[in-house]
Image (cartoon, rainbow, N blue to C red):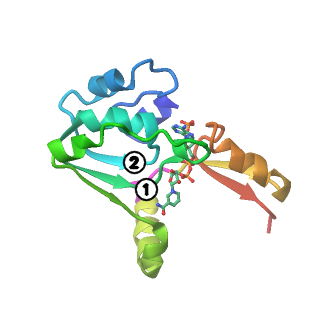
Amino acid sequence: QVNLLKTKFGFDDAFNYKKEEDLNAALKRCFPQGIDIYFENVGGAMLAAVLPNMRMNGRIAVCGMISQYNLEQPNGAPNLFCLVAKRIRMEGFMVLDYFGTYNKFEEEIAGYLKEGKISVVEDVAEGIENVPTALIGLFSGHNIGKQLVTIAHE
Ligand SMILES: NC(=O)c1ccc[n+]([C@@H]2O[C@H](COP(=O)([O-])OP(=O)(O)OC[C@H]3O[C@@H](n4cnc5c(N)ncnc54)[C@H](OP(=O)(O)O)[C@@H]3O)[C@@H](O)[C@H]2O)c1
């Protein structure tokens, strides 16, 4: 998967968080100058490791915190004071708020897809009976690419 990120998706660097003993050290290796913008999808230990590696006036767009969803006791980042010390702006967003601009989004993204500016990888399960397995798989890294389920073939 690390290879996929560095080749097909064109990231300069990547690491597998499951194989790193020290997330802070891994981030320092990949971002020796620090992080300007972090797109948050994970929360918990990853957020705690990212915060001290953020640069002054950095920005964090909060899309999700998947590591926290099924915990009885969420284990949020204990070092949020980094937001103050580094003057970081952290802001959440919900896709529901942008449905009004969906047509514009579709038009723009369709163009990028045609031009090959965006790569798409899909992980397709077959049949409605596989919806629960596909959904649960999201929490254990079973999917590689956007998880879809085919309900019927036209
Ligand atoms: N703000 C919004 O409007 C909005 C809308 C939809 C989704 N979201 C959020 O977007 C994020 C991605 O959702 P998605 O539906 O696109 O799923 P996805 O990225 O296709 O799949 C979820 C991935 O999360 C990783 N993951 C699961 N547990 C983890 C953990 N404990 N620590 C680190 N990584 C973990 C797994 O990757 P590995 O293979 O590395 O384990 C899995 O592949 C989620 O946080 C979701 O809540 C936000």
Q: Name the residue rendered at 45%, 48% in the picture.
A: 41
Q: Which mark is residue 38?
A: none
Label 1 CB sits under 8 Å from any ligand 1 atom: yes
Question: Is 127 situated left or right of 142 in this image?
Answer: right
Residue found at the very far front of the displayed protein: 73
Other-residue count near label 1 (Cα within 10 Å), few / some / many at <14 / 14–19 / ≥20: some
Q: Which residue is mark 2?
A: 40
Residue 144 seen in render: yes
Q: Name the residue rendered at 34%, 55% in the picture.
A: 61
Residue 11 seen in render: no
Could you tell me how far apart the alpha carbons at marks 1 and 2 are, in whole angstroms? 6 Å
Other-residue count near label 2 (Cα within 10 Å), few / some / many at <14 / 14–19 / ≥20: some
User: Who is closer to the viewer here, 77 or 27?
Assistant: 77
119 lies above or below 18 = below
Q: Which residue is mark 1?
A: 63
Q: Position of residue 134 (x, y in %)?
A: 72, 48
- Secondary structure at badge 1 equals loop
147 lies above or below 23 = below
Magenta stretch: residue 39 in it?
no
User: Who is closer to the viewer here, 145 or 41?
Assistant: 41
The part of the image, by quadrant, that contains residue 30 is top left
Q: Position of residue 71 (x, y in %)?
A: 59, 42
Q: Which residues are magenta?
A: 115-119
Residue found at the very far top of the displayed protein: 21
Q: Are marks 1 and 2 in contact (CB under 8 Å)?
A: yes
| Badge 2 amino acid | Glu
Q: Quadrant of the C terminus?
A: bottom right
Q: Name the residue rendered at 21%, 27% in the picture.
A: 32
| Badge 1 amino acid | Cys
- Secondary structure at badge 2 equals strand
Q: Position of residue 115 (x, y in %)?
A: 40, 59
